[in-house]
Amino acid sequence: MIKLRSLSAVWQNPAFTAFLLARLTGMFATQIQAVIIGWQVYELTGEAMSLAYVGLVQFLPMLVLLLPAGDLIDRYSRRSILMASWVVASICAGALWTLSAHAATGAEGKTLALTGIYATLVLFGCSRAFSGPAVQSLLPQIVPRAQLAQAIAANSMLMRAASIGGPLVGGVLYSLGGGTLTYAVCAVCFLLGVTFLVPITTRYAEPPATDAGSMWQRFGVGIRFIRQRPIILGTISLDLFAVLLGGVVALLPIYAKEILHVGPTGLGALRSAIAIGEICAGVWLSLHPFNHAVGKRMFLAVAIFGAANLVFSISYWFWLSFLALAVAGAADMVSVYIRSALVQFSTPDNMRGRVSAVNMLFIGSSNELGEFRAGSAAAGFNPITAAILGGLCTLGVVGLWMRLFPTLRKVDKFEEAGF
């Protein structure tokens, strides 16, 4: 069992502390930007399909670039790649800041702003193709393997803390100063993240990958590695289909404006409800960690996630909706903690870039492509029907995956997933 003194040993590592500060500022900027883009796009168009395109234009460049990104991350400095990608993200926030000024200049200005937002999100998706797998595979190079599970728990908890503050602050900033003020804050936060990365040392990095052949052949090695390990394949594919089919985040602007009638500040609160549940679960995991029946607990957590989203989908009361999202967030935090630990314990260091890239591809599919699924379903049916169907699909995925991946279901301890 992880003791509190073990957690303090993790915090005594200055590189780990700097890494957390960098991730906090980067996550803070990403969360602010995500909630404001959704509100601003829906305010410009009033169409659910426009929210679907927000996810799609970010997912497509990630789909194209994640695989070569994983190969580069295994062969070059992960810290440098992450720094470069956040510089690009800061440039994107600056472009969105400029476009926000045009959004208030009549119909022509709104059309120009909307087109520019989509184009900027394509570039932002390119940066995320590199930053996602880079930040995931950098942590095992900073802390020793014996402290990896503790570091993952602490990292996940603090990332959820940023997820609470980001949407709330984003909603308030947008109410006070519109998109110009909000995107300026995002740009500064991304640059702060780059600054925090500068002093980080990778004491536990292993020699980079030296696989011969072309980039695609090297990545093929990573794909075969994943296919041969049902624990990794089952873990990342469960996240893909559970969130792809059951996520409701893309529908929050519609619920906030048309169903719950709470405006942009309420939208920020709904986004933060998910993170509040996540951080509460993260604190609990830090104080009461477990390393028993981890496979079954992961499936249970995903099932609770789907059930909580079902409650949210039929709620017309803000506080019930808030509570349902908080429960979904708590369940997701438990699932994320288990999934992250299983993947890290199952993967050697010289393969982590490629495995993390595939993992990010699946996460990107579940999040950005999931937003497209939710938005298009809301446009074809209605938001409530789309949310209900999504929750039911998540529960169906859990039952099916328990049958398809019995090895994953039977995993008892994290160490059993070792390579």
Image: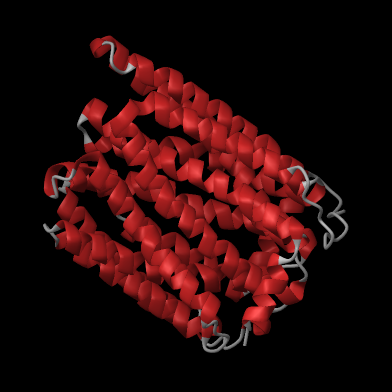
Q: How many marks?
A: 0
Q: Evaluate whether residue 400 shows in this view.
A: no
Residue drawn at 47 percent across, 38 percent down: 58
Work out which quarter of the rendered image holds the C terminus and state it: bottom right
Q: Quadrant of residue 88?
A: top right
The residue closer to the viewer here, 267 or 49, is 267
Q: Evaluate whether residue 165 shows in this view.
A: yes
Q: Quadrant of residue 320?
A: bottom left
Residue drawn at 87 percent across, 53 percent down: 210
Q: Is residue 294 above or below residue 101?
A: below
Residue 128 percent coordinates (x, y): 57, 42
The residue closer to the viewer here, 206 or 237, is 206
Residue 179 percent coordinates (x, y): 37, 27
Q: Is residue 68 above or below residue 20?
A: above
Q: Is residue 80 above or below residue 305?
A: above
State how the image is colored.
secondary structure
Compared across the picture, whether 194 is left or right of 258 comes to: right
Residue drawn at 37 percent across, 46 percent down: 167
Work out which quarter of the rendered image holds the N terminus and state it: bottom right
The residue closer to the viewer here, 238 or 212, is 238
Compared across the picture, whether 162 is left or right of 129 comes to: left
Residue drawn at 69 percent across, 63 percent down: 224
Residue 169 percent coordinates (x, y): 38, 43
The residue closer to the viewer here, 112 or 106, is 106
Residue 263 percent coordinates (x, y): 20, 40
